[in-house]
Image: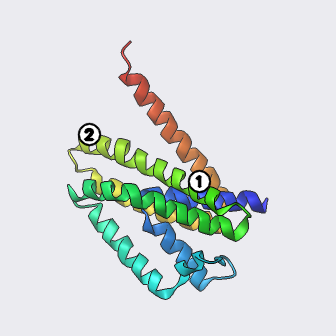
């Protein structure tokens, strides 16, 4: 059961990184720094709990949150984050998987990269353009705020209650797949 919970934690954190690259890393770092009995990171991931890294991550969270809410800048931010978010997801996955499981680091990095990259792709290539098109851009700020809250909530849940986070992740991925399939069917001629 511990292995399964560790995997749920890793997947929850990497999915959160697909929405906001730095929130799950900051959550992992803060919990490892202040509650090492809950999350004791192995080297080299223990650097996430370093005070200076936590300050840097806090600044990066603020920068990404602001950039994601400014029209036109948010599209440039998503372009830049196409590389950053999957890498952050890989780090979050590997750091958390290394705590609880014996998952090989390369496999953990690859899984985190794929999960965060997939969530980011859905966000940047499907959800955000649809929100921009249907609301004339007015819906981007509330959607961005919701994404940040979801990333924070999922990151905390992934560590504190990984089983619930795993279930939420499966439900979220199922809803995204259902939405995507419905969109795809509507675009095909009859």
The numbered mark at residue 134 is 2
Identify the residue at the far front of this view. 106
Q: Residue at x 53, y 78 (%)?
A: 48
Check the image and report above or below for 11 versus 173: below
Give the image location of residue 170, x and y in percent: 60, 46
Question: How many C-alpha atoms fall within 10 Å of the one at disc 1: few (<14), some, or many (≥20)?
Answer: many
Q: Quadrant of the N terminus?
A: bottom right
Identify the residue at the far bottom of this view. 51
Most foreground residue, 66 or 40:
40
> Which residue in the protein does label 1 denote?
111
- In terms of image quadrants, where is residue 31? bottom right
Quote the CA–CA distance across marks 2 and 1. 33 Å
Identify the image's colour scheme: rainbow, by chain, secondary structure or one colour: rainbow
- In terms of image quadrants, where is residue 70? bottom left
Residue 166 visible to an observer of this rendering? yes
Residue 71 visible to an observer of this rendering? no
The numbered mark at residue 56 is none
Check the image and report above or below for 182 versus 70: above
Q: Is residue 70 left or right of residue 172?
A: left
Q: Residue at x 54, y 66 (%)?
A: 91
């Amino acid at each position: 059961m511990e292995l399964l919970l560790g995997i749920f934690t890793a997947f929850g954190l990497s999915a959160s990184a697909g929405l906001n690259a730095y929130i799950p890393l900051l959550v992992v770092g803060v919990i490892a720094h202040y509650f090492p009995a809950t999350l004791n990171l192995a080297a080299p991931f223990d650097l996430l709990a370093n005070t200076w890294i936590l300050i840097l991550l806090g600044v990066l969270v603020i920068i990404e949150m602001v950039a994601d809410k400014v029209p036109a800048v948010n599209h440039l931010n998503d372009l830049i984050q196409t590389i950053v978010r999957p890498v952050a997801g890989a780090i979050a996955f590997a750091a958390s998987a290394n705590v609880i499981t014996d998952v090989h680091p390369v496999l953990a990095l690859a899984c985190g990269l794929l999960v965060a990259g997939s969530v980011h792709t859905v966000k940047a290539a499907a959800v955000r353009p649809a929100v921009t098109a249907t609301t004339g851009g007015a819906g981007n700020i509330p959607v961005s705020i919701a994404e940040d809250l979801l990333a924070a909530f999922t990151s905390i849940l992934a560590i504190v209650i990984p089983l619930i986070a795993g279930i939420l992740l499966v439900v979220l991925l199922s809803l995204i797949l259902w939405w995507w399939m419905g969109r795809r069917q509507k675009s095909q001629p009859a």
